[in-house]
Amino acid sequence: MSEKQAKNDAGWKFDNSYSRLPNFFYTKINPTPVSSPKLIILNAPLASSLGLDEGALRSSDSLAIFAGNQIPDGGLSIAQAYAGHQFGQFNRLGDGRAHLLGEQLTPQGERVDIQLKGSGKTPYSRYLDGRAGLGPMLREYIISEAMFALGIPTTRSLAVVSTGETFLRETEQSGAILTRVAASHIRFATFQYASEFGTVDELRALADYTVLRHFPEATGAENRYLALLQEVIKRQAQLIVKWQLVGFVHGVMNTDNIAISGETIDYGPCAFLDVYEPGTVFSSRDSEGRYAYGKQPDIAAWNLTRFAETLLPLLHDDEKQGAKLIEDAISDFSEQYHSNWLSGMRSKLGICNEESEDDSLIEGLLHLMQTYRADYTNTFRALTLDRPEDTIMYDKLDFRQWYELWQARLSRQQEAKAFSHQLMSNNNPAIIPRNHRVEEALTSAVVQGDYSVMERLLDVLSSPYAYSAEQVEYATPPVLSTNCYRTFCGT
């Protein structure tokens, strides 16, 4: 395996702070080289924000980095260890097909992970080949960039390269490697791994590192580990609300797929609602509906409890006192979540102040949407455009009664109608990455070798709140949508 380092013409400015943790947390291992890599897509705006030169990133030297054939100057390739709950069952895990090359120090003074995904086997591969398919990697690129444009904290995609090789995973697939950018890849499951298999000193080292990297304001707290827990809870409450407000279904909220930073990570069997139905499940693996759209807040609380339990030895010398701190902190999640959700839903309806009946007004609309199988995104789009006649519910008496209540509610606030309209426009996307549009783009790319469909989709998704004429065709739901769309964990 080559350890040759690529020359640094692109602007890489690496540090490797995670590798300065005890080696219990990772294994030093290089990616597995591939035969004939080809650059499929490069995220130029992201590259610029990272302090990287787009032209240099299109060179053969950079292609070798994106393919895992060379390590960038200053990089140190490792695979991270973790262990967590998958569909409620605890497993020892780790990066089975990913290599962390290091942390890019950006012109803005930020530190972000640069990770290759689909780059070969590691000691944590669990009998898999360490490879990933072109379709799933392009899918992660599309959805993660759409989430960024929607204003939702997320990992991002810098590049996708094809490997020139195929591999067998149910069917023969074309190989690909995605370069992922993240605030970090520290997961709830990283803490579970330390708690279950490490020493208290190793757990403390991880917690201290996490505080310094993500929550430096907590270093001066009376109890920095309690402050860490509280900040993680706060970020999760904010994140899950943002998912719910746009109808995003993560699909596999295992604790190894939840980032401490509060970013959305691991776009496996995710998708977006067409019809509003809280019980919607897209993942082919989730036969019990554990990770249904409507259950995501409850699962977040469950995952947070598992994370909090790992901090018990650090929170207090007395175990009972530590458990009480955990109980009190976790109990705040539901209140934070509901407060954030109510605020977000008010904005989606153009409501600028608070009234005690707002909750029932919002729930009333959601009930009607579920009853009449209304499209989630397009219902709010129609209300934003003041075209209630565009909704499937328009000729229903109970919807018209609700609409009158809503109009009366808006009339009781001091803000002008134009202000409410702008508030709605800013919070109701005109388009989302519709599942049928994503599949259309992937089929064109993977089967036909035509990337123009994907490129156009990415372009319109980059400004989801624009309400432009070119977006209209992308706002159309699939014909006879029944939410029977199925996704598979290929990423």
Image (cartoon, rainbow, N blue to C red):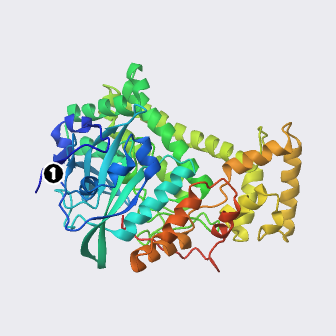
**Residue 319 falls left or right of residue 48:** left
455 on left or right of 21: right
Residue 428: image location, x then y, percent: 68, 53
Residue holding disc 1? 29
Please name the residue shown 42% across and 80% down the image: 448
Q: Is residue 371 above or below residue 414?
A: below
Indicate the quadrant where residue 179 lies: bottom left
Q: Where in the figure is residue 348, as x and y percent of width and height?
A: 71, 50
SS type, badge 1: loop
| Location of residue 309 with respect to 43 vertically, above or below | above
Could you tell me the amino acid type at mark 1?
Answer: Ile
Q: Percent from the top left, x then y, of residue 237?
A: 53, 43
| Mark 1 residue crowding within 10 angstroms, few (<14) / some (14–19) / many (20+) | some
Look at the image and tell me whether residue 265 can be seen: no
Q: Nearer the viewer, residue 473 or 85?
A: 473
The answer to whether one can see residue 295 in this image is: yes
Assign the C terminus to one quadrant of the image: bottom left
Position of residue 171 relative to residue 415, above or below, is below
Residue most toward the left?
A: 1
Where residue 489 sits, quadrant-wise, is: bottom left
In front: 163, or 77?
A: 163
